[in-house]
């Protein structure tokens, strides 16, 4: 289950909010986390819930450990992808692009992630672009539904509070 949660705050604040606040699902309160994405179909499915640009449960290890700059991991708890390295950014990181790790999925917008501000403060947290999506031809099927678009991702400074919320997930 996925849901757009309206929340104005930094990535860290949104992350804390996602794991500490239950959401209503079918009349009951459920514990969840910021969404992770394991496939093109899942990304397309989540695109249906985007009301605006939103935080995603991925982070560049460089945010906490400069030696690991450019190593993108899923950081959300209680998920089969938690802690997994799924993407390695080109070196130097600010050149944009990189390599999806074998068995994983990424849907970065062209030239992303690029760590645009290169450590000042840097762009180490992932977001969905609600307004930028690729048309899937042919459509992919996820959960028995044919989906024809999939949102691209961008890296953004973790201390940015410009997004309108995050995508929340539970299983």
Image: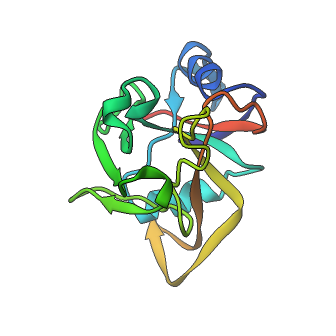
- Identity of the residue furthest to the top in this view: 20
Instruction: Name the quadrant containing residue 83.
Output: top left
Q: Which of the pair 47/113 is nearer the observer? A: 113
Residue at 57%, 42% in the rendered image: 2
Quadrant showing the C terminus:
top left
Which residue sits furthest left? 102
Residue 17 in the image: above or below residue 107? above
Q: Is residue 143 visible?
A: no
Q: Residue at x 72, y 49 (%)?
A: 53
Which residue is outermost to the bottom?
A: 137
Instruction: Residue 88: give x, y in percent of width and height.
Output: 32, 51
Q: Is residue 146 above or below residue 108?
A: below
- Across the whole image, how many numbered discs are drawn on residues? 0
Spot occupied by residue 161 in the image (x, y as percentages of width and height): 75, 30
Image quarter for residue 119? top right
Q: Quadrant of residue 66?
A: top left
146 displayed left or right of 89: right
Answer above or below: position of 119 versus 49: above
**Viewer-side residue, 122 vs 8:** 122
Residue 60 on image: x %, y %: 43, 38
In this orientation, does residue 42 appear?
yes
Residue 41 x, y percent position in the rendering: 44, 64
Judging from the image, the colouring scheme is: rainbow
Residue in the image at 37% along x and 52% along y: 38
Look at the picture and state if 45 lies above or below 64: below
């Amino acid at each position: 289950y996925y849901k757009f949660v309206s929340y104005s705050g930094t990535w860290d604040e949104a992350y804390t909010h996602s794991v500490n606040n239950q959401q209503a699902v079918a009349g009951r309160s459920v514990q969840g986390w910021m969404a992770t994405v394991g496939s093109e179909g899942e990304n397309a499915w989540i695109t249906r819930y985007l009301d605006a640009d939103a935080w995603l449960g991925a982070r560049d290890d460089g945010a906490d450990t400069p030696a690991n700059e450019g190593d993108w991991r899923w950081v959300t708890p209680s998920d089969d992808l938690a802690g997994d390295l799924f993407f390695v950014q080109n070196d130097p990181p600010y050149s944009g692009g990189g390599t999806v790790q074998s068995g994983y999925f990424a849907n970065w917008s062209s030239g992303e992630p690029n760590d645009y501000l290169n450590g000042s403060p840097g762009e180490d947290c992932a977001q969905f672009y609600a307004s930028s999506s690729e048309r899937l031809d042919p459509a992919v099927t996820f959960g028995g539904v044919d989906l024809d678009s999939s949102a691209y991702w961008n890296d953004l400074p973790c201390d940015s509070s410009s997004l309108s919320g995050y995508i929340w997930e539970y299983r």
